[in-house]
Amino acid sequence: MRIIAAVDTKSYSDEIMDYVARLAANTWSDLTLLGIQSGNTKVEENLIQAIVRYRNTIFEHEEDAGLYAPVSMTELKETAKGRWEVSSRARKEFSVVIRGGDARKEILAEVAERNADLVILGCTKGIDCIWEGEAYLPQKIARDAPCSVLVIKSARKPDQIVAFLDQTNVSQESLEMINQMVTVNNAGLKIVGLKTPKGVKGDVEKKMVEILKYYNEREIGAWIKLVDSENLEEYVAQSTREGMVALWMGKESILSKIFSRGLIEKLISNTQSSVLLLR
Amino acid sequence: MENNKISILILDDEPIVSKRLKPSLEKKGYLVETFTESEAALKRVKEKKFDIVITDLKMEGLSGMEFLTEVKKLYPDTEVIVITGFATMDTAKESFQKGIFDFLAKPFKLGEITAVIQRAEEKIRNNSQS
């Protein structure tokens, strides 16, 4: 798995680092710490200092497993205008990349360049989710990134993952990403399926049983809740108080049709914990 | 190696994994056999040595960890790649202690596992030359 943790110098970036380190160490992922700054002529000293702290947290979590090789900030090389990088490889690749410019544009460019599976970022706890001085940035990344995005508003480890799956069309990658989240957090799993006002059709029920069987065979204690599609928005909002909310928003997902882009943004604004958008 | 081609055995109880990997690896010139049951895969490795073994960990019956232990016991120079949907630091450490080549958490992109296979192939070819 390839993970990008987008960071700046603020406390919310500090707060997500334990989670990033734990996830990366447990999944043995290639990890990029992507530092974003406004200027693109030279690397800013306060960002370097923050990244050194984040890097140290990452290395504390890898328990001498030889997962990553250390990198020194003095070896950062400018690879393109406003982009600096230093990488190392032990068992997995560890990179620090610094990009200067528009945060949204720079994060999405790095996601594309690295073909990442997951982007993680924190933000302020209010509804505007400020990141690097810009309001609603996590919402924009969640909306526009081609891969899964995890927005962490509370560093507290979730006790439960509430996964909203489009049971008629759920992707293997989504099921796998949920597996990893449940394993890393040692959390319970609630799978939420959709029913129409007319009730549950036979094939929907069959698919939900298959999904439940999939998790039970893997010794993940999951339970299922069926929700009217009309009440979905309200139920999702309520679930943000229960733990991490995971929504499959792949191109073929019904959820991506029910949830307009505006609703995703609202969900991230209103959540008190974490939101995982699966693609 | 048969006719200088690298042989790969894939074991995953989810058929979709082999279904995704097999055609792509065959297109790259690898000889690929796939299994969804560990007992059947073990029977096959007892009959034939594979250059690379790709195995899931969590499976019914013989676990992936037990399977890879058997593979390394039979053929210490077979390169084993672990793929798992339930990765933990402990399972990764245990796998590496048993001499695996790499450990990949699912989901992964085709390009990621192909790159790992290519690195394993490079190692195998270098070892066979020396």
Image: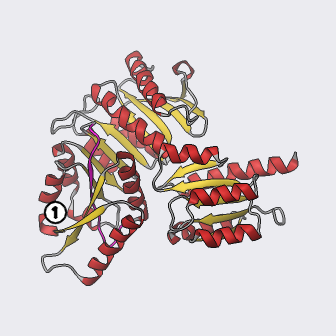
Which percent across, then down, holds residue B60? 50, 67
Res A5 visible: no
Q: Report the predominant secondary structure element of the magenta stretch.
A: loop
| Residue at the image point whose x is 49% and y is 49% from the top | A1
Residue at 61 percent of width and 35 percent of height: A90
Judging from the image, mark 1 belongs to the subunit labelled A
**Residue assigned mark 1:** A232
Is residue A179 shown left or right of residue A113?
left
Q: Nearer the viewer, residue B62 or A65?
A: B62
Rendered image coloring scheme: secondary structure
Number of marks in the rendered image = 1
Quarter holding the C terminus of chain A is bottom left
Asked whether residue A159 is drawn in magenta, I would say yes
Instruction: Read off the magenta span.
Output: A156-170
Closer to the camera, A73 or A241? A241
Q: Position of residue A237 (x, y in %)?
A: 15, 53
Quarter residue B83 falls in: bottom right
The vertical placement of A212 against A189, above or below, is below
The amino acid type of the residue labelled 1 equals Leu
